[in-house]
Image (cartoon, grey):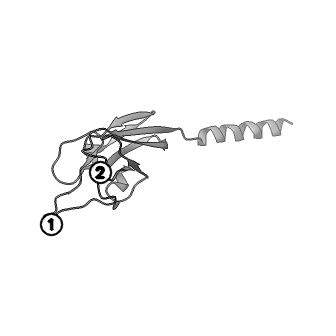
């Protein structure tokens, strides 16, 4: 009986220590210039930045506002990039000179020239959080 009790306690401690707390991240854009197309959100880690996404969302825009909710996101450092995909082709369109033709923004709302940088967009998710991204 004592062995069974010790085994049960060890199993319980193991389960508790392996449980990873997760959080909800709400990301709102409230300055879209129109409701055409979709607002495309990409939540990334540093190793995925500008390559792939941990989670994505494609949200309809209503009266210039679109909100994405990312759930079950573990503690850590992240960045969010948002694209107003006006023609709904699920990619950023560029002019012949290489300039973006669709509005975009990222977490922390940096005003930078050139491609987005991880260091400008990085934030730490340690609790449920709401952020606003400006295009």
* Furthest residue toward right: 1
Within 10 Å of disc 1 (Cα), the crowding (few <14, some 14-19, many 20+) is: few
Numbered badge on residue 61: none
Quick check: 89 left or right of 9? Answer: left
In this view, 87 is above or below 9:
below
Residue at image x 43%, y 52%? 54
- Along the line of sight, which residue is nearer the eye, 32 or 133? 32
Q: In which quadrant will I find the C terminus? A: top left
Residue 56 percent across, percent down from the top left:
42, 52
Rounded to the nearest whole Å, what is the CA distance between mark 2 and mark 1? Answer: 19 Å
Of all residues, the one furthest to the bottom in this rendering is 96
Residue 62: horizontal and vertical position, in percent?
35, 42
What residue would you read off at disc 2? 84
Front-most of residues 11 and 62: 62
**Pointer 1: what residue?**
96
Instruction: Indicate the quadrant where residue 87 lies.
Output: bottom left
Q: Is tag 2's residue or tag 1's residue first in the polypeptide sequence?
A: 2
State the residue at coordinates (13%, 64%). 97
């Amino acid at each position: 009986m004592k062995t069974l009790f010790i085994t049960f306690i060890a199993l319980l401690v193991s389960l508790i220590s392996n449980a990873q707390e997760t959080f909800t991240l709400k990301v709102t854009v409230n300055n879209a210039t129109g409701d055409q197309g979709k607002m495309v959100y990409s939540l990334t880690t540093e190793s995925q930045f500008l390559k792939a996404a941990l989670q994505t969302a494609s949200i309809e825009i209503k009266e210039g506002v679109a909100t994405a909710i990312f759930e079950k996101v573990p503690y850590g450092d992240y960045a969010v990039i948002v694209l107003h995909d006006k023609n709904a082709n699920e990619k950023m369109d560029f002019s012949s000179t290489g300039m973006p033709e669709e509005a975009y923004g990222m977490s922390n709302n940096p005003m930078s020239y050139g491609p987005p940088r991880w260091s400008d967009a990085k934030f730490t998710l340690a609790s449920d959080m709401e952020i606003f991204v400006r295009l």
